[in-house]
Image (cartoon, rainbow, N blue to C red):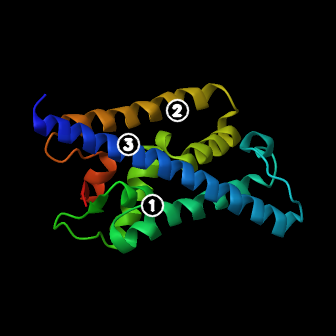
């Protein structure tokens, strides 16, 4: 491998690792918020799993907790420096076409349209939201499996296109928001 190939693999590894850790941090924040909301609204101190609340009013606590934590993790924190928590540690950042920190509206488009809709199979909030909505509409097994495969296919296609993009390694959410991830 040439040096450029090694640098690209390092960059892709850091970007992937940052996403995995940020996704995990987001899940922890969401669990805490969901437990807090459950405690405040229902006066209960228990933590529950999504499957336990699919047919109860508490499902919206999960969605609200995930939505708030996702906005904090993937929009608010990066709006200051262009970096999520783990991107800062790994010295990469999201920038706009002029290599500036993206505007908050750009980060909102990047996250909500690109991540939650197009690449939803990779994000906790949208995965859980799709399960809740599709369960209510179609029942649990049949359509969820079909749509799940479709969403995983779209996410995989986004990753394949990013790997083929040797210049900027842009995923769908980068292309839609006109952003890119660079070394900080």
Which secondary structure lies at badge 3?
helix
Q: Which residue is mark 2?
A: 147
Q: Are marks 1 and 3 in contact (CB under 8 Å)?
A: no
Seen from this angle, which residue lies furthest right?
43
Which secondary structure lies at badge 1?
helix
Disc 2 vs disc 1: which is toward the camera? 1
Which secondary structure lies at badge 2?
helix
Foreground of the two, 50 or 88: 88
On screen, 153 above or below 128?
Answer: above
Q: CA distance from mark 3 to mark 2?
A: 24 Å
Quadrant in the picture for the C terminus:
bottom left
Residue at the image position 13 percent from the left and 28 percent from the top: 1
On screen, 92 above or below 5?
Answer: below
- Few, some or many C-alpha atoms within 10 Å of disc 1 (few <14, some 14-19, many ≥20)? some
Residue at the image position 58 percent from the left and 61 percent from the top: 69
Q: Which residue is mark 1?
A: 85
Q: Which residue is mark 3?
A: 16
On screen, 61 above or below 101?
Answer: above
Give the side of residue 178 with respect to residue 127, left or right: left
Q: Earlier in the sequence, mark 3 or mark 2?
A: 3
- Few, some or many C-alpha atoms within 10 Å of disc 2 (few <14, some 14-19, many ≥20)? some
Q: CA distance from mark 1 to mark 3?
A: 13 Å
């Amino acid at each position: 491998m040439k040096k450029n190939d090694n640098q690209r693999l390092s960059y892709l590894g850091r970007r992937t690792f940052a996403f995995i850790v940020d996704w995990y941090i987001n899940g922890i924040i969401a669990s805490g918020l969901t437990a807090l909301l459950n405690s405040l609204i229902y006066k209960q101190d228990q933590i529950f799993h999504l499957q336990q609340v699919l047919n109860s009013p508490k499902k919206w606590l999960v969605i609200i907790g995930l939505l708030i934590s996702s906005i904090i993790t993937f929009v608010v924190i990066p709006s200051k420096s262009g970096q999520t928590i783990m991107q800062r540690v790994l010295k990469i950042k999201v920038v706009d076409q002029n290599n500036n920190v993206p505007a908050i509206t750009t980060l909102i488009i990047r996250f909500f349209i690109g991540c939650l809709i197009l690449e939803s199979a990779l994000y906790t909030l949208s995965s859980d939201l799709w399960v809740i909505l599709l369960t209510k509409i179609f029942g649990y097994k049949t359509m969820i499996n079909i749509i799940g495969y479709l969403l995983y296919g779209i996410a995989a296609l986004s990753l394949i296109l990013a790997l083929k993009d040797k210049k900027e390694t842009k995923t769908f959410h980068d292309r839609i928001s006109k952003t890119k991830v660079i070394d900080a």
